[in-house]
Image (cartoon, rainbow, N blue to C red):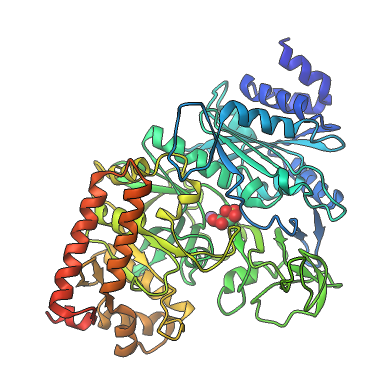
Amino acid sequence: MDKVKEFLKDNLTTEDYDKLTAVDNPKMHTFVADAIELCRPDSVFVCTDSTEDIAYIADLAIKNGEEKKLAIPGHTIHFDGYYDQARDKSRTKFLLPAGSDLGASLGSIEKSAGVEEVRALFKEAMAGKELLVCFYCLGPTDSVFSIPCIQITDSPYVAHSEFILYRTGYEQFKKIGKSEEFFRFLHSEGELDERKVSKNIDGRRIYIDLEEELVYSLNTQYAGNTIGLKKPALRLGIHRASKKGWLCEHMFVLGAHGPGGRVTYFTGAFPSACGKTSTAMLTGQTIIGDDIAYFRKINGKVHSVNVEKGIFGIIRDVNPKDDPIIYDALTKPCEVIFSNVMYDDKLKPYWLGMGIEPPDEGINHSGPWRKGNKDADGNEISVSHRNARYCLNIVDLQNRDQRIDDPQGVPVGGFIYGGRDSDTWVPIEEAFNWTEGIIGKGASIESETTAATLGKEGVRKFNLMSNLDFLSIPLGRYIRNNLDFIEAVETPPKIFSVNYFLKDKNGKYLNGMADKKVWIMWAELRVNGDADAIETPTGLIPKHKDLEKLFKEHLDQQYSRDDYVRQFTIRIPETLSKLDRIENIYKQDVPDTPQIVFDTIAELRKRLKEAQNKYGDYISPFDLENK
Ligand code: SPV
Ligand code: MN
């Protein structure tokens, strides 16, 4: 018997040892043995795909106090520390060998120093705890898209969340034999305080080794930092995709149901808290996924899968009117983990914008809470955190798409890029072609910041493909990969920009929350050649007559010409300023920007200026329609 197996035999129960070694993968065994030696847990549990093993993890989360049962069967609540409520960008770093460089915007640390630092923090970090060894699969199992993953963690909350969010992977691991191609994640929540939340926030680290496809995460519980398969794996996925010629995007996958029963699949990228999940959840449509998608070319077509099988969604403003399907799942017996909402003495959860008045006291992310309580910085503590979440299985949603687990994925008709933009982009516009779509839409996303990352809200930030936080390759190469991806694709997906957040001069939103459905249904018609469009300097926008019909059909609303003009006026000065900002970012901060980015921006600017000379600063869509 080799040394690693001997070590494992000495440190695992016979049952766990047998489970682990039934998967005959030396690299995986070495990873587990090293984690045990480093973190020194009291015990080890190896989790297979069996329901008993998975139930053991969920029970452990209750036993150790990281989750608490709520009144509705299957529902639990979890809290993260008061200052551990979002992704920590500043302490998320790539471990880079000396001499390599990803560009200034991607945080990194020299690899040997970083590994030494983080391993020192992991030393004996699991004393008194159980180390959990869990196997998952990114993408559907038994598919060209599948990526097996191993997660080691001392947090049953993290492992439990992953069993909701990802397909199981123990059997998948058996199938890959001795292959070394899998992602590895090592997590420890570190010391917990009496509320069972990570205590040493200063020691929070998320360190990513791209070459090894290995991520260390520590002293944090917030899922965006700890759930290896979510944002850590998104970074590994982008890196691997770039090497192998596919795409890994921060995108939902939605089935839009058009006339005659046809289904057209869209994928969409929006920065956090900008309407991504609610677009993926549009009524009357079907959902494949709401966060991360892989893309491959299959038989000359672009196909996509949901990397996940569950949703870790923002719960703020989820109410029966705006999000009826999610609200239904959050109020019926099924598996749900709520995080950072409030519960009362009847074990009922409450959150901001749920459509009913919450009680004046309960337990929330700050501990025992009363309306009006202030935190240490003097800020009033809201009933739930603005980035509070729910975690649930997509199978528990009425609107799941039938092809959710299709190993071939689904063919993609359109890409949608959106952001929180109060004054520039129209509600929807189709790009003239793939190149203009990738550059003028995806690579030009700016969005006003939200509560999903630490820092000030409401500041306009560049966020190409809403993937900036997760890029693990130089920005220019990432754009190039997107541009080149449709080589040899007969009909590339159409590319659309959307903007749900336009405001008038008084700061009032120009659109209702429900309007997004009309924009997506218009895109569905466009992909299938069933609607005309008006040419603008930057793309193609809907005609009033088509929107009028769609508003009537889908929302039972009149859509006036005035509303249309207010929303679809082309704002030349704002669009030109935006182009300047975007061009400057690429000029100053992205040394490997492909020349075509500058050429395309120059072309867009030329067309905008020509239109400005002809029509003035603000162009009504009717002027363009009648030209
Ligand atoms: C996002 O913020 O993009 C999310 C949630 O999907 S998190 O896991 O924090 O990334
Ligand atoms: Mn996301």
Tally of numbered tags: 0
When the figure is inspected, residue 510 is found, relative to residue 97, above or below; the finding is below
Q: Is residue 619 left or right of residue 520?
A: left
Residue at the (67%, 74%) spot, across then down: 352
Instruction: Residue 525 in the image: state x and y as whole percent.
Output: 29, 68
Residue 63, visible in the rendered structure: yes
Q: Is residue 471 left or right of residue 88?
A: left
Instruction: Residue 302 in the image: state x and y as whole percent.
Output: 34, 47
Instruction: Residue 595 in the image: state x and y as whole percent.
Output: 24, 45
Examine the image and state in which quarter residue 311 appears.
bottom right
Residue at the (29%, 84%) spot, across then down: 565
Q: Is residue 150 left or right of residue 596?
A: right
Instruction: Residue 564 in the image: state x and y as whole percent.
Output: 31, 84
The quadrant of the picture occupied by the N terminus is top right
When the figure is inspected, residue 117 is found, relative to residue 505, above or below; the finding is above
The foreground one among 486 and 449 is 449
The foreground one among 184 and 503 is 503
Residue at the (67%, 25%) spot, across then down: 31
Residue 310, visible in the rendered structure: no
Residue at the (17%, 82%) spot, across then down: 623
Examine the image and state in which quarter residue 529 appears.
bottom left
The quadrant of the picture occupied by the C terminus is bottom left
When the figure is inspected, residue 436 is found, relative to residue 172, above or below; the finding is below
The foreground one among 580 and 359 is 580
